[in-house]
């Protein structure tokens, strides 16, 4: 992921125009003079290729941190939805009905589902989006980036996360009798082969599976039925890749986790696989890998990679924008770290500064609590005062101190 999960892999199949913001190691595209930045949108870069994606991740990260996103930010995301429930990467004219020029995609729609569900659902927006995702499922049980395109690991996994977030069991979502859990094993490289345990983005033109760390990290979460936000899971029974003729989802996840653990064992990070990149760290995919490793119960390896990010990823996040900060927040959450102290950087403030200021959820609830405390407190002291006056002729009225949560 950028800033998006499907980045490097999507570039391989020629949808770079739609996946460019997914470039894992580079900054987001600079703002175009032809595209104004809408009010309510997070980030100042051109939103043409990643507007919905980065907004969704930003809102979801804020909810993970205990914030209530600004209404304007949620309104902007909801306003991007087409009448059929789908989301495109960005609609410059949301007031105009979606037509053939608007290209909805599974990744933007699935990300929006996770974010909107986290902020309360926004009426029927989530249900409509899930309905659209179901309608474009492929016969192999998976999803491609665009409707009708061949299924891939990244798109299938992010849709699984959306279905799970919406309260729908991905195993029950089927096309031609196949669910997404039938699709993922087809991209899992058998143990003993080059890249064994990893997942490919898709088979190449010759049908060969090539290990792809980006797809592997996404595939771990997909196989575990999890979305962007995940916590540490139970440690796998076996650390290494274990052979299975027809691997179940849990085995696909464990084998993929073993591959990722090995990939970050030496340096603590993944290397970029983009054309022309030489020994360049892949910050985005490393952050995704932290979440995947933690979710698979490999907390030691996850913490090692997170420690590397703390030392090296600050500048990358500042250049890349809200989705990058969100990825780091998800990584911190997965390993139980403090996002407010990320190698000397406060990820919370950095993310919230990217757009409309959210409100701490505790503070929102505290207002009512304090108002209630004030009313009941004054009543109690009035009764006490009256009792004192009646008993000894002298009344002292004390003002109570408000109880504030830290």
Image (cartoon, rainbow, N blue to C red):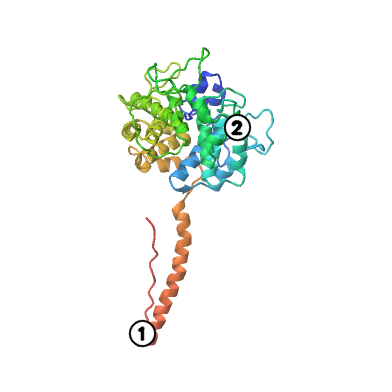
Tell me the residue at 43%/36% (across/down). Answer: 325
SS state under label 2: loop
Q: Nearer the viewer, residue 238 or 30?
A: 238
Query: What x and y, as percent, mark residue 26?
Result: 45, 25
Depth check: 171 or 266 in front? 171
> Which residue appears at 47% of the width and 45% of the height?
63
Mark 2 or 1: in front is: 2
In the rendered image, residue 318, in percent from the top left (x then y), is placed at 42, 34
Compare residues 332 and 350 and report the one nearer the observer: 332
Q: Which residue is mark 1?
A: 394
Q: Residue at x 47, y 64 (%)?
A: 371
Q: Residue furthest top?
A: 206
Lower position in the chain sequence, tag 2 or tag 1? 2
Q: Quadrant of the C terminus?
A: bottom left
Query: Badge 2, how many Cα within 10 Å: few under 14, some, many 20+?
Result: many
Residue placed furthest toward the front? 245
Where residue 236 sits, quadrant-wise, is top left
Viewer-proximal residue among 239 and 108: 239
What is the number of callouts on the image?
2
Label 1 residue SS: loop
x and y percentages locating residue 259 in the rendered image: 37, 24
- At a point 40% along the width and 80% down the height, the residue shown is 385
Q: Is residue 367 visible?
A: yes
Q: Which residue is mark 2?
A: 88
> Mark 1, residues whose alpha carbon is within 10 Å: few (<14), some, or many (≥20)?
few
Q: Is residue 250 left or right of residue 176?
A: left
Mark yes or no: residue 80 visible.
no
């Amino acid at each position: 992921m950028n800033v998006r999960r499907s980045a490097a892999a999507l570039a391989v199949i020629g949808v770079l125009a739609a996946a460019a913001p997914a470039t894992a190691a580079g900054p987001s595209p600079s703002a175009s003079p032809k595209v104004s930045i809408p009010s309510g949108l997070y980030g100042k870069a051109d939103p043409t290729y990643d507007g919905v994606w980065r907004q969704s991740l930003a809102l979801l990260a804020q909810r993970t941190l205990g914030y209530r996103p600004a209404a304007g930010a949620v309104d902007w995301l909801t306003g991007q939805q087409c009448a059929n429930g789908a989301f495109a990467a960005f609609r410059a004219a949301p007031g105009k009905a979606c037509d053939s020029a608007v290209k909805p995609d599974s990744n933007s729609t699935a990300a929006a589902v996770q974010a909107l569900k986290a902020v309360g659902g926004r009426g029927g927006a989530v249900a409509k989006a899930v309905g659209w995702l179901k309608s474009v499922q492929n016969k192999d049980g998976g999803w491609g980036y665009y409707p009708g395109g061949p299924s891939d690991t990244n798109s299938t996994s992010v849709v699984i996360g959306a279905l799970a977030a919406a309260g729908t069991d991905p195993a029950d979502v089927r096309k031609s009798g196949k669910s997404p859990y039938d699709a993922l094993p087809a991209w899992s490289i058998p143990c003993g082969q080059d890249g064994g345990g990893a997942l490919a983005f898709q088979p190449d033109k010759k049908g060969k599976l090539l290990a792809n760390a980006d797809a592997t990290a996404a595939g771990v979460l997909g196989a575990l039925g999890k979305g962007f936000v995940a916590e540490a899971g139970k440690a796998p029974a076996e650390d290494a890749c274990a052979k299975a003729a027809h691997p179940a989802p849990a085995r696909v996840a464990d084998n993929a986790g073993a591959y990722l653990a090995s990939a970050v064992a030496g340096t603590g990070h993944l290397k970029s696989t983009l054309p022309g990149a030489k020994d360049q760290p892949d910050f985005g995919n490393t952050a995704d890998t932290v979440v995947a490793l933690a979710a698979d119960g490999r907390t030691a390896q996850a913490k090692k990679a997170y420690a590397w990010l703390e030392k090296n990823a600050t500048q990358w996040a500042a250049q890349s924008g809200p989705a990058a900060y969100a990825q780091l927040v998800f990584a911190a959450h997965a390993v139980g770290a403090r996002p407010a102290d990320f190698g000397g950087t406060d990820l919370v403030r950095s993310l919230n500064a990217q757009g409309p200021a959210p409100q701490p959820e505790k503070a929102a609830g505290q207002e009512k609590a304090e108002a209630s405390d004030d009313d009941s407190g004054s009543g109690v002291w009035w009764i006490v005062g009256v009792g004192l006056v009646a008993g000894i002729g002298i009344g002292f009225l004390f003002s109570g101190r408000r109880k504030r949560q830290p």
